[in-house]
Image: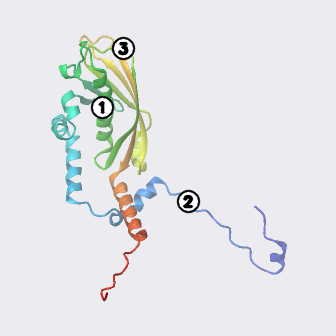
């Protein structure tokens, strides 16, 4: 950086204070900036939605009840989620008649569709009812036929807890190995592999963004012309 000009020193003028750039707003600051006034008070419908969302992740029974009403595809397939280790979850897709095809093997549509369901159940159970979870991209590789129950081994590629603590919206990549369950606890055959990306956004942030857009639209909307009542 250059020093003050010699003419300014001779005239006894103090050099200007150095300009500092403001620090960038992190996602933590963005979440703290969303005051309850900006996001608005939660309505009765939003409180009911949050209660039902928490209820659906409490245990297997309420998960099945909520799936029957809001996610009939998962209810009919019979998929369930269970914890394998601290950072690894497994979903089980039963080998029922509704999930089999004409050749008495697991239908490809059942394996593909339940991949999104399994990953969504895992992610929704981790982020909680305060987030909106949307699938952005999914890639599935069929490796061999599945002639038994399918196990979805779900592993997040990023530190999900760190992303949640940071606040704000984020993308999360999940990797799943789909294997055929063996009754005698032998070697499980890998029948597919899935890569899926979800976008997670806090509901309070989405609501505050919608309110800001509505207020901006009201300011830019031209006023209606006044009518002459004397005509």
Asked if one can make out residue 219 in the rendered structure from this viewpoint, the answer is yes
Q: Which mark is residue 144?
A: 3
Q: Horizontal and vertical percent for residue 109?
A: 30, 25
Q: Around disc 3, counting alpha carbons within 10 Å, would you say few (fewer than 14), some (14 to 19), or many (20 or more)?
A: few
**In the image, what residue occupies the spot 34% across and 57% down?**
207
Label 1 sits on residue? 118
- Residue 204: quadrant of the picture: bottom left
| Front-most of residues 152 and 185 | 152
Q: Earlier in the sequence, mark 1 or mark 3?
A: 1
Residue at image mark 2 = 23
Q: Position of residue 199 (x, y in %)?
A: 39, 43
User: Where does residue 172 sit, x and y in percent of width and height?
Assistant: 42, 39
Element at label 2: loop
Answer with left or right where residue 4 lies relative to residue 195.
right
Question: Relative to residue 109, is residue 5 depicted above or below?
Answer: below
Give the label, 1 or 3, closer to the camera. 3
Above or below: residue 18 compared with residue 24? below
Give the answer, above or below, for where 205 lies relative to 162: below
Residue found at x 37% / y 20%: 192
Rounded to the nearest angstrom, the CA distance separating label 2 from label 3 is 53 Å
> Which mark is in front, 1 or 2?
1
């Amino acid at each position: 950086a250059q020093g003050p000009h010699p003419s300014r020193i001779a005239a006894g003028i103090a050099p200007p204070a150095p300009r500092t750039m403001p620090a960038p707003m992190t996602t933590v600051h963005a979440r703290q900036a969303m005051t309850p006034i900006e996001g608005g008070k939660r309505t009765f419908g939003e409180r009911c939605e949050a209660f039902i969302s928490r209820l659906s992740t409490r245990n297997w029974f309420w998960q099945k009840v909520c799936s029957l009403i809001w996610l009939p595809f998962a209810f009919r397939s019979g998929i369930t989620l269970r914890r394998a280790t601290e950072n690894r979850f497994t979903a089980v897709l039963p080998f029922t008649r509704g999930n089999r095809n004409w050749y008495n093997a697991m239908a490809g549509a059942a394996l593909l569709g339940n991949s999104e369901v399994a990953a969504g159940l895992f992610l929704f159970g981790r982020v909680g009812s305060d987030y909106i979870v949307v699938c952005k991209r999914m890639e599935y590789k069929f490796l061999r036929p599945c002639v038994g129950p399918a196990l979805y081994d779900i592993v997040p590629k990023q530190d999900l807890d760190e992303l949640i603590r940071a606040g704000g919206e984020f993308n999360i990549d999940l990797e799943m190995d789909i294997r055929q369950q063996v009754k005698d606890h032998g070697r499980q055959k890998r029948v597919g592999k899935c890569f899926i990306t979800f976008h997670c956004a806090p509901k309070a942030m989405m609501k505050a963004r919608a309110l800001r857009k509505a207020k901006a639209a009201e300011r830019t909307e031209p006023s209606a012309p006044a009518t002459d009542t004397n005509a």
